[in-house]
Image (cartoon, rainbow, N blue to C red):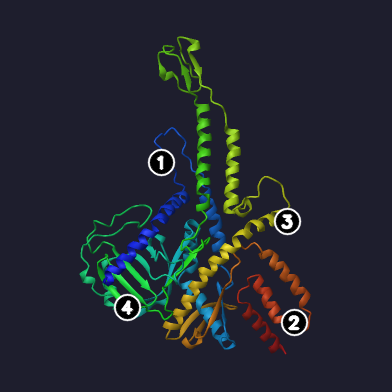
Amino acid sequence: MKTLLEKILYNYQKASEYRKPHEERWRRFYNLYRCRARAMDDETRANVFVPEVYTIIETLCPRLISNYLNTSKPIVEVLGREESDMTNARASEKLLAYQFERMQLPLKLVTFYKQALMYGTSIGKVFWDYRVGKNRDSEEVILYDDPVFEVLDLLDFYIDPDASTIDEARFCIHRKFLSLGELEKRQESGIYKNVDKIGDTGSFHDSMDFNDEDDNANDPLEDRKIEILEYWEDDRVVTVAERSVILRDSPNPFDHGKKPFVHLFFVPVPFEFYGVGVVEPIEGLQLELNTKRNQRLDNVNIILNRMWLLQRGAMDDLRQLRSRPGGVIVVNDINGLQPLPAPDVTASSYQEEDKIKLDIQNTSGVSDYIRGAMGSQKQTATEVQIKSEQSSGRFEFNFKLMAEMGIKQIARFVLQLDQQLIDRQRSVRILGINGVEFLRINPDEISGNFDLYPCVDPMRVHEAEKRQQMLTLYSNLISNPIVDKKMLSKRLLEAFEIQNADNMLQNQEMERSSAI
């Protein structure tokens, strides 16, 4: 029967072998995003990289992340499942918004979602972080006592090869690197043990990153980053250092009883854990585009710096065969030197390049209208809007799916951790009608059963249309005696992303009451 350490290392090896083919693809996609041209032995040949992959990803990523930056709407709406849960749901929503800000979630989502766009899959981790320090008077103070969301490098996450989701996986492994000092602090806090048994056993840096840089292996133990395998099952977590020392073996510390990872993909592949990103379908087209561009440049170079057909003995100094303004070539036989014909194929190559770019647009869905380029044809504003909405509509499903798998699951983990670990009154900063205000929330005010709804318009292409429709609806219904005017006004303010619509309406209502 295998020991616990043998079991973990066996599962790690299985997961590593399962992931190897994907690593090769991810390495290629990474190089395409970084516009890294292939190495060439002939330095006289053109070796230009056309940044189509980079442009596509940097077009989609800002559109996706803009939903979470500088918006007056909550990122996630919290609703109670029962009527009795609604009051606590509103308090939980405010606490959640404040914690998202503290953990710098919008900035972390840039990496989280961009990784999914590039490779098709992204992994995050939600856990609770408690840190204490000392103030100027050497008094112990709490520096941080809230949930944390961490984006994981795909190369540092290993999954059960038979699983297509985190929940159905028998195990997950998070690989990370910590210094000896960090491990000793965790041992002092009671999280780890056996840190003193870690010897200079060498470091394991296989597949750590795409740059293949390892400056760590020869460092002394106290400076070297030590490999940690954090092995998770639904009911258990085991931490192994240097694949030889068990630092922790304990029950799952979270009451939700799940592995604390968030799994996201751009395009799902049925019954597979790893999805398809933006780069994979256009990889061949990007390479073809580079080839055509470089062939055209080589053709132009040959035309400008022509080659010659030279009869033996027709000239004495071959160094004269160099293209230069006002140059003279002295030959013994005028018929013994002729230019090598080089047909100009630039016109046809431009057509071929346009076809390839059109194929890339059709495959990726990122048209000129998504990029903000209107094209050479004159079109009305209505035509441009229709084409822009048609181009954007293709991504609505993908981006809404990413919101459901990503931000919604993050919020669910955070609320579950709040209900488990918050044991004292919290002061939450909110932006009210009179500026910054503070709301005090007690632990019993966040209990209950809630449903979560991401508040995003993935491509933000329907905002103007929705606002115009809301204005029309408001003007038609505001005089109707059976319509709740306060609720109608609130919806209008929310359509224009007015901060704290509830407070604005309440204050106006109070002013009218006091005037009477």
Query: Which residue is disc 4 drawn over?
Result: 250
Alpha-carbon span between mark 4 and mark 3:
62 Å
Ranked by sequence position, the earlier of labels 2 and 4 is 4
Which SS class for mark 1?
Answer: loop
Which amino acid is tagged 2?
Val
Q: Secondary structure at mark 3?
A: helix
Disc 2 crowd rating (10 Å Cα; few below 14, some 14-19, many 20+) is few
Residue 39 shows which numbered tag? 1
Percent of width and height locating residue 160: 39, 66
- The residue carrying pointer 1 sits among few (fewer than 14), some (14 to 19) or many (20 or more) residues within 10 Å by Cα, namely few
**Nearest to N terminus: mark 3 or mark 2:** 3
Q: Residue at x 45, y 34 (%)?
A: 45
* Spot occupied by residue 344 in the image (x, y as percentages of width and height): 57, 29
Distance of label 1 from label 3 (alpha carbons): 47 Å
Neighbor class of circle 4 (other Cα within 10 Å; few <14, some 14-19, many 20+) is few
Spatial CA span between label 2 and label 1: 69 Å
Q: Are marks 3 and 2 in contact (CB under 8 Å)?
A: no
The amino acid type found where label 3 is placed reads: Thr
Q: How many marks?
A: 4
The extreme top residue here reads: 332
Asked if disc 2 and disc 1 are in contact, CB closer than 8 Å, the reply is: no
Q: Earlier in the sequence, mark 4 or mark 1?
A: 1
Measured Cα–Cα span from mark 3 to mark 2: 33 Å
- Residue 157 lies in what quarter of the image? bottom left
Q: Looking at the image, is mark 2 or mark 4 nearer the viewer?
A: 4
How far is disc 2 from disc 4 in space, using C-alphas? 57 Å
**Viewer-closest of 84 and 430:** 84
Give the mark, 4 or 3, whose residue is nearer the N terminus: 4
Report the residue marked by disc 3: 382
Label of residue 483 in the image? 2
